[in-house]
Image (cartoon, rainbow, N blue to C red):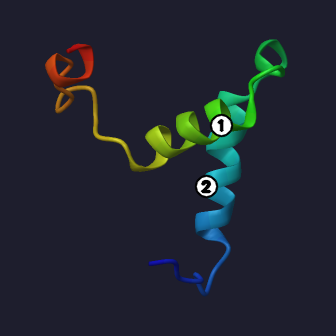
Amino acid sequence: MLSISPTTAECERGFCQLNLIKTDKRTSLEYESLASLLRIKIDGSSLQDYEAGPAIC
């Protein structure tokens, strides 16, 4: 479910994360890769909670 935030804080956080991902050296990222990296950065679990086993198999 999508919702509209009453403030711009969520948007600003999203653009901040996007700027951290898409640097001058990573300008050729495809849209899908960029969207996936941004989704992981914003919604993903911390490295301490991540289990690599299911992702490798």
Q: Is residue 30 above or below residue 13?
A: above
Mark carried by residue 11:
none
- Residue corresponding to mark 2: 13
Tally the numbered discs.
Answer: 2
Q: Quadrant of the C terminus?
A: top left
* Identity of the residue furthest to the front in this view: 57
Q: Which one is nearer the viewer's eye here, 50 or 57?
A: 57
- Residue corresponding to mark 1: 32
Image position, residue 39 (x, y; %): 50, 45
Which residue type does callout 1 highlight?
A: Glu
Look at 51% across and 77% down and name the residue there. Answer: 2
Image position, residue 1 (x, y; %): 44, 78
- Badge 1 local density, few (<14 within 10 Å), some, or many (20+)? few
- Badge 2 local density, few (<14 within 10 Å), some, or many (20+)? few
Whole-angstrom CA distance, mark 1 to mark 2, is 20 Å
Image position, residue 48 (x, y; %): 19, 27
Which residue type does callout 2 highlight?
A: Arg
Look at 48% across and 39% down and name the residue there. Answer: 41
- Judged left or right of residue 44, residue 50 is left
Look at 62% across and 42% down and name the residue there. Answer: 35
Look at 40% across and 50% down and name the residue there. Answer: 43
The label nearer to you, 1 versus 2, is 1
SS at mark 1 in the image: helix
Q: Is residue 38 above or below residue 13?
A: above
- Judged left or right of residue 33, residue 27 is right
Q: Is residue 1 above or below residue 38?
A: below
